[in-house]
Every structure is written in C-alpha cells, then in structure tokens.
C-alpha cells in the first residue's frame, strides 16, 4: 500500500502534470497487475477508515490520481505488451542467450515505451525508434558484446 500512496502523492503534489512522465505512474501500475484498481480502492478505504476527518481530502486526492491515469491512458498498462521483448533484444545485439543484464534492459525499454508511446501512431515506427534508442544505451545498460562462435572456424 505504501507504493500506491507514494505514487498517488507524486501525481497529486505535481504542479505541472504535463511534466510528469507516463513511466513514473505506468511502471508502478503495471507492477500492481490487473487488480490495480481494487488495490487503489482498498488503499483509499484504509486511509478513510484510519483518519475519518479527512474523507473529502482523500477522495479528492485519489480522484486526482485516477484522472491522471485516464488522461494518460494508463488504465490498461498492466496488460500492455512491451514493444521489445527478450527475443528482440537478443536479436538486436546478436546474443545467443540472455543474462542478468536482461531485466534492466527490459525495464529501460518499457520506460522508454511508456514515455514515447504518444509520439507514434505506427507501432513499427515506434519499435524502430525504440531499437535505435536501445542501441545508444548499450554501454549504460551493460549489454554484452555479441558472442562469437569459434566452433566453425
């Protein structure tokens, strides 16, 4: 529940909603899974019960958060397919297998997708741009160099 409260606070306390990155809210919602709406409701009810005098304030805060989610079209982010999957990443970097680095790469690719999705109407164009961006992040994301097969030489 603390992550839910922190995410709500982040949205509510942000003076310039246009500057709030979609990934900042989308990643937590995605991690909460398909029951995220019930989890937010449960957190709201818990807050109302624990501090009865502030019911209207809590309702306004949660309403503000949910409005941001709707405005940013994040309500189904929990089931949104990633534009780049592990197989794509292995192919892009000519890797035969993944490793510990892959989790960070997948998180970074998801964050990029959430923050740039609105810029593209064509999924193929968005995927091409995501690949270009990811190639530029190779060193930062600690993606290994391609594996060289020496058995056929």
Image: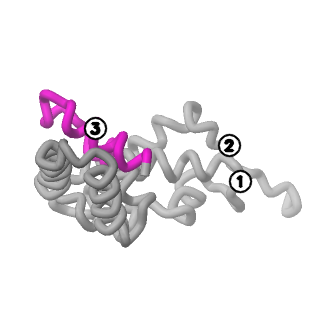
N-terminal label among 2 and 3: 3
Q: Please tell me which residue is depicted at 39% across the width and 44% down the height of the picture.
A: 132
Q: Main secondary structure of the magenta part?
A: helix
Q: Is residue 112 depicted above or below 70 in this figure?
A: above
Side of 101 where 9 appears, left or right = left
Q: Is residue 6 depicted above or below 78 in this figure?
A: above
Question: In this view of the protein, which residue sits in the foreground, 152 or 99?
Answer: 99
Residue 43 appears in view: yes
Side of 148 where 23 appears, left or right = left
SS for tag 2? loop
**Image quadrant of residue 133?**
top left
Question: In this view of the protein, which residue sits in the foreground, 35 or 47?
Answer: 47
Label 2, label 1: how far apart the Cα atoms are: 9 Å
Q: Please tell me which residue is depicted at 34% across the width and 56% down the height of the picture.
A: 46
Q: How many neighbours does mark 2 have within 10 angstroms: few (below 14), some (14-19), or many (20 or more)? A: some
Could you tell me which quadrant the C terminus lies in?
A: bottom right
**Image quadrant of residue 112?**
top left
Residue that mark 2 sits on: 144
- Magenta-drawn stretch contains 22: yes
Label 2, label 3: how far apart the Cα atoms are: 38 Å
Q: Mark 2 or mark 3: which is in front?
A: 3
Residue 149, given in percent of the width and then of the height, sits at 80, 57
Looking at the rendering, the stretch of residues picked out in magenta corresponds to 2-25
Residue 12, given in percent of the width and then of the height, sits at 19, 38
- Are the residues at dot 2 and dot 3 in contact (C-beta closer than 8 Å)? no
- Magenta-drawn stretch contains 119: no
Return the mark for residue 99: 1
SS for tag 1? loop
Residue that mark 3 sits on: 9
């Amino acid at each position: 529940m603390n992550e839910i409260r922190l995410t709500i606070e982040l949205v509510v306390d942000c003076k310039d909603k246009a500057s709030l990155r979609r990934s900042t809210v989308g990643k937590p919602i995605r991690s909460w899974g398909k029951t995220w709406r019930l989890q937010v409701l449960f957190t709201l009810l818990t807050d109302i019960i624990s501090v009865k005098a502030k019911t209207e304030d809590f309702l306004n805060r949660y309403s503000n958060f949910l409005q941001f989610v709707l405005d940013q079209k994040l309500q189904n982010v929990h089931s949104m397919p990633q534009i780049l999957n592990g197989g794509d990443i292995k192919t892009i970097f000519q890797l035969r297998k993944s490793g510990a680095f892959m989790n960070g790469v997948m998180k970074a690719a998801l964050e990029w997708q959430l923050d740039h999705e609105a810029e593209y109407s064509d999924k193929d164009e968005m995927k091409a741009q995501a690949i270009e961006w990811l190639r530029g992040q190779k060193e930062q994301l600690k993606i290994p160099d391609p594996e060289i097969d020496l058995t056929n030489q």
